[in-house]
Amino acid sequence: MHRETIEIPVGDKTLRLETGKIARQAGGAVLVHCGETVVFASACAAPEAAEGIDFLPLRVDYQEKYSAAGRTAGGFIKREGRPSEREILACRLIDRPLRPMFEEGYHNEVQVLSYVFSYDNIHAPDVLAICASSAALAISDIPLVKPVGAVRVGLINKQFIINPTADEIKQSELDLVLAGTEDAILMIEGFSNFLTEELVLEAIELGHAAIREICLAISGWAQKVGKPKNKEMLRRIPQEITHAVHNAAATLLESALRISKKQEREKTLAAIKAEVLASLLAADPASKQLKADVVLTYKNLQSSLMRKMILKEKKRIDGRALDEIRPIDIEQSILPRTHGSSLFTRGETQALAVCTLGGENSAQRFEDLHGEKTQRFYLQYSFPPFSVGEVGRIGSPGRREIGHGKLAERALSSILPKKEDFPYVIRLESNITESNGSSSMASVCGGCLCLMDAGVPIQRPVSGIAMGLILEGEEYAILSDILGAEDALGDMDFKITGDEEGITAFQMDIKVEGITIAIMRDALKAAKKGRSHILKKMLQACPHSRPEMAAHAPRIVVLQIKPSKIGVVIGPGGKQIRAIVEETGVQIDIDDSGLVSIASNNAEGMARAKEIVLNLTSEMEIGKTYNGRITSVMPFGYFVEVFGKEGLCHISEISERRLQNIHDAPFHQGDMIDVKVLDINDRGQIKLSHRAVLEQQHPVGR
């Protein structure tokens, strides 16, 4: 075994990459160390491309081993299985910047696997996995154009931090992950607390400077220890096929791309494609490779013509100007039994958002390397096949759905009220019912409106927009509110959420190098204008949150008790809290700080539960008057229960006149009586007086 290592300074930390000791049969295998966090990545490719493939079959998987943090998974099954949401999001972070960097014409199946083998609870493994995967590809024979690097950027006390620790990111106003090459940024994923565009650009510039050093180091290392790149498998489309497709389809495509309605346009494009395939495959209809070459050439021609129309004529395929937003229609409260609902339609993209409010039992429970946790706000996005008029699989959400849902969720997290002000768990659903571009941004807009419809007192409303780019050399055009075709055939998909003052979330994927900070600045400026336009439309439909929640939403009352009293409310083995729930029908949750949440749709049951909890946890004070129940009558006086505790009201303290016999008093067992606390001795014995209350003539009731 011959181990090769390299160390790369990144901010105030050092990445150590090594290869040659583990997984020597893989095409490329790298371990990345940062502190005591260790991430492994491997890259392998099939020896040949499957016949008829016109795309890169790239599969990226990422797994966090619980043993990395010295833990075993909870639950019945102890072996890692289906990837968690966090792992799926990390897979997307790795995949997005790597995919554009493979040589054109390489169609062999490629698999990139990443594992977290050690985690120190300090250094985040996701950005390390991007670097490890890039390095594994760089030293393999797989034809990667150039290495990719990645960093995370935080902002604490107006100071940017490269690769902040886990504790630092909790304090940060910014959580920005960016990846790229030494020359350009390829991917951005970030969330912030209403930061300005200039601050975001500053963070990107700083992050790219660190990425440049990573990429240069990996590139030099690959030249030293890497394998020669296998470019023999690259497939080039023959010139005669390119000319034949252009001659057969160019004129027809120019007309079809000017059809504004999506379904009519796609029907026409499909007919042209079928005609071209029938014509060019007539000589050899069984050839899968010929069909793949024709289909890819047809797609490239379609892209070229659309790009030419945008750059030269400043016209888009649906007839809009470059900065024009599609028509917006909003309808609130369309579902009668939900806690909140909103139908947001922008052009041919539509989201039906639904809000459900609940108690702590409604929180999303999950487990990761940090342990078991709960999430009080979560957004679940669904993209059924009917939204694009297709037939498809229905089942558990795919990676795209999870990624889009998380982006919208984090975009809205910054506007939620504090738990102390609104003690509800909030679940949002975004059901995409139509789609023609940027359904995730429709989810942000519909989700915000839905929160307002549910009566959630949000801090401020936000909107979202997706920006596109067409780049040819020095010439470029920025597109506002992109269509699905502009996303597929263009060079950039840049999603930005927030309001007129700042940004809450952003996500960018770039398919080509060459996008400069100046272009990003223009895109952010146009996005701000578009966000403002959409937000005004939203506020016209719903100026503010509803003052009252829906009739069917549960009500929650919050009590603060002493942490030392939590055990009293729960009781031995949970006996006491179960008894309260059975008697009142409410849902009760208690956190470690002593915050008690009582949720119910029944006002009487909630009032009774509140009374029981107060009785169990409140303490009597000397000199104060309370209303208690007589639990027993003795010759020498009454035993009176207040807050679950009994005190003695002696016969001499019952009436203003002297009583010879306890039965001469007007009270009986079970009656309620006002009593004043005279004394509480060291043993906890309580001395009460009804006579003192009569003398005061103004009893203070609880």
Image (cartoon, grey):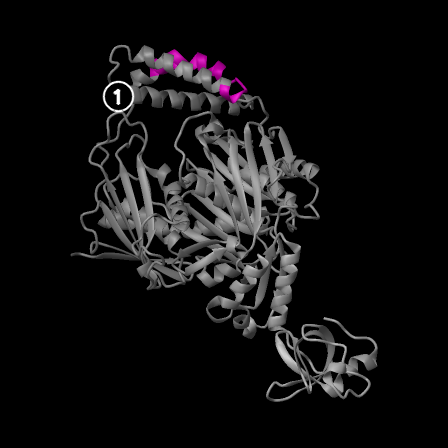
Q: Is residue 285 above or below residue 685?
A: above
Q: Give the quarter of the figure containing the C terminus.
A: bottom right
Predominant SS of the magenta segment: helix
Q: Picture quarter containing residue 620?
A: bottom right
Amino acid carrying label 1: it is Lys
Q: Residue furthest left?
A: 1
Q: Give the quarter of the figure containing the N terminus.
A: bottom left
Q: Is residue 466 above or below residue 137?
A: above
Magenta segment includes 245 = yes
Q: Is residue 22 above or below residue 301?
A: below
Residue 42 percent coordinates (x, y): 26, 48
Let me know if residue 349 appears in the view. yes
Residue 143 percent coordinates (x, y): 27, 38
Would residue 287 appear left or right of 349 to someone viewing this image?
left
Residue 186 percent coordinates (x, y): 42, 41
Q: Which residues are magenta?
A: 243-263
Let me know if residue 473 appears in the view. no
Identify the residue under disc 1: 288
